[in-house]
Image: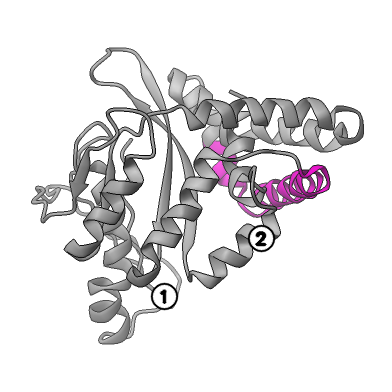
Amino acid sequence: YDVLPFFCNFILHIGSEKSTYAQLAERTAQNACKIQAKLDICHSVAQAGKFRKILSFSLQSLEKTAESSLALLYEHINEKLFFERDKLKELIRAYWASLSSDLQNNTNSYANIQAMKTLSEPSYLRDRWAGISHLKQAKIWRNSLDENIEEKMQLLNELAQWLKNQVPISAAFASSSKSEKVLYDFLQLFPVNSNKIVTATNPDFEIISGQKEFLMLTNEVSSFARAINAPYFYDDSSIALEIYAQLLIWGTLWQEIRLKNGAYGVYSQYSPV
């Protein structure tokens, strides 16, 4: 458990069996694509009392570079190798500095995670992945670099070997139909049962109503939020909703709220928890 968040944060910033990180970064820029990784903790409805750890990847690219961008994503997922010792040391130091800065600037977030960790096992694990416990572990990694770097590289490489043998739960895309074959061919590169494609359709979810709050603040900037019921991670449309959230930010919400009505900003997020 203690290694997973480090792996998730480092995996896209380390080289593969075929390429150094510098080469991967150059190809990413040439393809005008963006690749992200995210680690979630979710309750498992199918298994009462159990919870699942989900590592998800997202890719944004131009349609004309979809095939080469997916090849990059595959290399990150299936051919990762933590061999760049100096790069890994740099990442660990930078990661600790980032977490330390977050703690100083966002104390409430850490306090909330700390307060919740006794409520459930997922809440406890969230502290080990994003709270004070994780911050302490990051400090240990930073302070023991010189004597334990080989051990840390071995742990991360074991996770990389585990990842390449995993079957994706599901996959979703938002693009024109001509890219569907490209995505299908990409999924065939993974172990069996990975050819399930969920195409983003038009989901219809009930808007939460009944609770309305208005808070008076001494501030020249007002904020407004709206919540909508959405399915958990095990639903077929859950990954598609990750895409919808991104499309809303740069599509309808940006055009109607940011540009036409002059709001300072707009944000949309799907949470499968």
Question: At 50% across and 41% down in the image, what residue appears?
Answer: 77
Q: Secondary structure at mark 2?
A: helix
Position in image of residue 3 (x %, y %): 64, 28
Q: Secondary structure at mark 1?
A: loop
Q: Nearer the viewer, mark 2 or mark 1?
A: 2
Q: Earlier in the sequence, mark 2 or mark 1?
A: 2
Q: Is residue 110 shown left or right of residue 169?
A: right
Residue beneath disc 2: 23
- In the rendered image, residue 98 lying in the magenta stretch gets the answer yes
- In the rendered image, residue 234 lying in the magenta stretch gets the answer no
Can the viewer see residue 21 in this picture?
yes
Question: At 75% across and 29% down in the image, what residue appears?
Answer: 152
The quarter of the displayed image where residue 81 is located: top right
Q: Is residue 119 shown left or right of residue 245?
A: right
Q: Amino acid at mark 1?
A: Val
Q: Residue furthest right?
A: 147
Query: For this rendering, which residue is in front, 260 or 272?
Result: 272
In the rendered image of this protein, does residue 131 appear above or below residue 208?
Answer: above
Query: For this rendering, which residue is in front, 63 or 137?
Result: 63
First to last magenta residue range:
84-112
Position in image of residue 154 (x %, y %): 73, 26
Q: Quadrant of the N terminus?
A: top right
Q: Which mark is residue 221?
A: 1
Question: At 10% across and 56% down in the image, what residue appears?
Answer: 202
